[in-house]
Image (cartoon, helix red, strand yellow):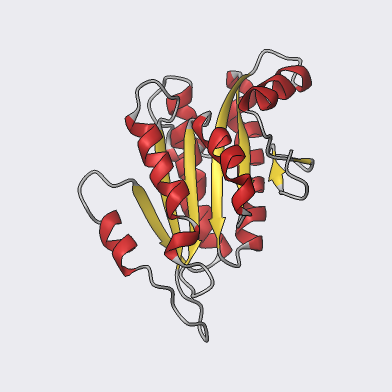
Amino acid sequence: MFAGTDVNIGGSHPFLLYESAMELLEWLRGSLRMAYRLVNLFCRVAGNLAQEREAFYQAVADCNAIQGMPRGVLFTPLSIGTYAPERKDAVDANLRVSQYFLLVVEDIWEAPLHTFLHDYRLAMKCRADAGLPMQELAVMLKKTPAGEDPGDLASFRAGLAAEGAPRHFEFSTVDEFRSHLDPLLSDWLALAVGHAPLAADSSC
């Protein structure tokens, strides 16, 4: 288990990324003694994004409470920032059992492409593999704050503009981040329960 890796199930109690995907699933089965179907949502964060990470947890908690629980489906969010190389295999295993992948990147020099590209490429491979549960991935790009040096993300941005690239959004503030994230979670939850995306007035 990862000591100190902050992962949250969508409420106030964080849990840790697990070294074994089966260990994670067994923990969830034992902890949620109710008839909910669990949908793994992996959030990879790159940059100084503590506020956005907390907003992500709150958005998932809101979506679970407002839409997920009445439908018997809950997101189980797995979130991680920068991690040591020895944790790579465990991170990969958790990503491979996820249905959705969200990459949140701040365009600053402290979040260079190499720090998150492996996870993004693995998520893309998982989506293309019919034998894995990955359904969709999305990218959230935070614009370079005033006074900061931008990162070297030009090639990455160009790839996002290509045909077949995942959905992507840019934001500057936490409120703007939530304005993109809430409808995205609503869409993903609707897909998970086999329905069309929900109307705007019933979004998370």
Q: Residue at x 52, y 31 (%)?
A: 98
Q: Residue at x 45, y 42 (%)?
A: 184
Q: Position of residue 40 (x, y in %)?
A: 56, 31
* Marker count (numbered): 0
As drawn, is 32 to the left or to the right of 183? right
Q: Residue at x 65, y 62 (%)?
A: 51
Residue 137 appearing in the image: no
Name the image quarter holding residue 199.
top left
Q: Residue furthest bottom?
A: 147
Q: Residue furthest front?
A: 86
In the rendered image of this protein, does residue 124 appear above or below residue 27? below
Q: Position of residue 102 (x, y in %)?
A: 48, 46
Residue 76 appearing in the image: yes
Quarter of the rendering occupied by the N terminus: top right
**Of residues 42 and 75, which is closer to you in this image?**
42
**Of residues 133 and 70, which is closer to you in this image?**
133
Q: Position of residue 38 (x, y in %)?
A: 60, 23
As drawn, is 65 to the left or to the right of 97? right
In the rendered image of this protein, does residue 55 appear above or below residue 112? above
In the rendered image of this protein, does residue 15 appear above or below residue 141? above
**Of residues 70 and 35, which is closer to you in this image?**
35
Quarter of the rendering occupied by the C terminus: top right
Name the image quarter holding residue 9.
top right
As drawn, is 194 to the left or to the right of 85? left
Q: Position of residue 99 (x, y in %)?
A: 48, 30
